[in-house]
Image (cartoon, rainbow, N blue to C red):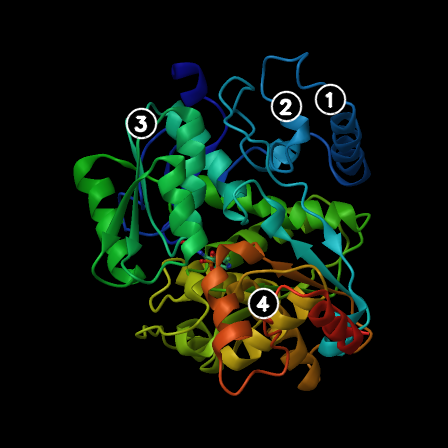
Amino acid sequence: MTSVESSRTRQRCDDCGNEIGALEIATQCPRCGGLLTLEYKAPAERGKKLRARFDARRAAALGYDVLASEVAPLDGSGVWRYRELVLPDATPNDVITHPEGNTPLLRRASVARWCGVDALVLKHEGANPTGSFKDRGMTVAVTQARRVGASAVACASTGNTAASLAAYAAQANLPALVLVPSGQVSLGKLAQSLAYGARTLLVRGDFDDCMRLAREAAEQLGVYLANSINPYRIAGQKTIVLELLQQLGWHAPDWIALPAGNLGNTSAFGAALLNAVDLGLIDKMPRIAAVQASGAAPFAASYRDDFRERYAVRAETVATAIRIGDPASYNRAVRVIRETNGVVLDVPDSAILEAKALVDAAGVGCEPASAASVAGVRELVRRGVIGRDDAVVAVLTGHILKDPGILLQYHREMEPPPAHANRPIEMEAELRAVERILASAR
Ligand code: F0G
C-alpha cells in the first residue's frame, strides 16, 4: 500500500484546497466538508504527442485477443485508454473493467432537423455494458474500492448508478447495497440491480433522502460510497468527453449538451474540457448546455439568478433518472458553467417525451432523461443561443430499454394519442387482416 500511497495522485478539496492521499477514504473534505477532486501529475506528453498516444491505443484495441491476455484489456476500454487523465497509478491487475465506453457518435437527419441544427451528433452512452454512462465512473470507483480494501460498496440512486454498481461489484466480488426511492425507479434499472445481485433497498422517500442515508452509511457504517461525489467516479466520467473529442478527430464542437440531475456528470464534463484545453488536446473550449426537467430544475433556477442563490425543490418529472431536487455536486457544477461559458435551462416533460419519440423513431432510442439533452438543443436553437451552423454533440445518457413503462404508456395508453404514438394493433389470426394493415402501412 505504501508504494501507491506515496504516488503522485492526491485528493484535493474544491473549497479549501486541503489535500489528502489517493488511498484515503473520505466522502468529503475532512476539514471543511467540501467536495474532493483527484489531482495528478500532468502527463509527460501534450498536444499532438498525447493525441497520438491515445489514437495508437485505440487502434491497438482493435487487434486485441481476449483469450491471449490474462490482465484487463486497458486499451480496449473507452475509460482506461485515457488512464493518464483518469487514474494513472492503477496497475492493470487493480482494474475492474467490463470493458466499457467505446460508445458511438451517431448522425440522424430527422433529429437534426427537429432541433434546427444540421451538424448535430448524438453520443450514445446507452451503449455501455449496463446501458448508461454510469459504467465509466463505476469501473474507476470499484477499482478504487478494491485498492483501498473496502469490504462493501453502496450508493443512492435513481436507478442507473444502482444497476452499474451492482454489475461492477459483482465482477469485483464485493457486496453492494443500493438505495433507491421506492416506487420511483424504472423497471429495467430495478430488474438489473436485482439480477446482478445487489442488496436492493427500496427507501420510502425520494432520491434526496436516499442520498442522505447513503452518506450516513458511508460515514458511520464504513461502506465505500460510489455516488458521483466520489472523485473516482468523476474521473471515469470525464472520458465521455475525451472519447467524443477523439471521435471528432480532436476538433472541438461548439456545444456539448447533457441532461443534468445530481450534477456529477456536468462536473465531469467541465473537468475533462479543462484538461483537454490545458493539455492542448483541443484548441478551443466548447460550451456546455446542462438541461434539467422543469419539475426538477433547481440548478436552472439558480443559473437564471446568476448563481446568487442555491435552490432545493421537491422534484417531479417523467424523467425519473433526473428526478432530483437538491443536487450533490451543485457548487462544482456552478464553476463548470462559468468556466465553459455554459448555459443551464429546463425543458417540460412534454418536450422530453417528444424528443425521445423522435430519437426512438430514428432507430436510435434512449431513456426519457437522455432526451432532455436533445429537447434542450432544440430550445436553445429556437432562442438563438445555439447557432444553426454550430457543431453540437448531444449526449444520450441511457438505453431505450431502461424505462419500458413510459414507452408503453406513451404508445399504448396516453389519451389523446401523442403526435408520435405508435399504437399496437390487435387482430384475428387471418392473412386478410395482415394484408389490410400492410396496405395502410405502405
Ligand atoms: N441521465 C441519466 C440516464 C441518469 O441516470 C442520470 C443520473 C443523469 C442523466 C444525470 O446525471 O446526476 O450526474 O447530473 N442518474 C443518477 C443515478 C442520479 O442514480 O443513476 P447527473
Query: Residue 401: image x %, image y %?
Result: 54, 55
For label 4, the crowd category at 10 Å Cα-Cα, with few meaning under 14, some 14 to 19 and many 20 or more, is many
Q: Answer whether labels 1 and 2 touch (C-beta < 8 Å).
A: yes
User: Which of 426 and 317 lies nearest the eye of the viewer?
Assistant: 426
Q: Earlier in the sequence, mark 3 or mark 4?
A: 3
Per the image, label 1 sits on a secondary structure element best described as loop
Q: Which residue is mark 3?
A: 150
- In this view, 225 is above or below 157: above
The residue depicted at 31 percent of the width and 46 percent of the height is 28
Q: Residues within 10 Å of mark 2 (few under 14, many from 20)?
A: some
Mark drawn on residue 64: 1
Alpha carbon separation for disc pair 1 and 4: 34 Å
- In this view, the residue farthest toward the left is 220
Q: Residue at x 42, y 65 (%)?
A: 320
> Between disc 3 and disc 1, whose residue precedes?
1
Q: CA distance from mark 2 to mark 4?
A: 32 Å
Say the numbered circle drawn on residue 73: 2
Name the residue nearer the viewer: 435 or 233.
435
Give the number of the mark in front: 3 or 4.
4
Q: Position of residue 140 (x, y in %)?
A: 49, 35
Question: Mark 3 or mark 2, which has the lower sequence index?
Answer: 2
Q: Amino acid at mark 1?
A: Tyr
Residue 371 is marked as: 4
Q: Secondary structure at mark 4?
A: helix
The quarter in which the C terminus is drawn is: bottom right
Residue 147, position as x, y percentages in the image = 40, 23
Three-letter code, disc 4: Ala
Q: Quadrant of residue 80?
A: top right
Q: Nearer the viewer, mark 3 or mark 2?
A: 2
Q: Amino acid at mark 3?
A: Ala
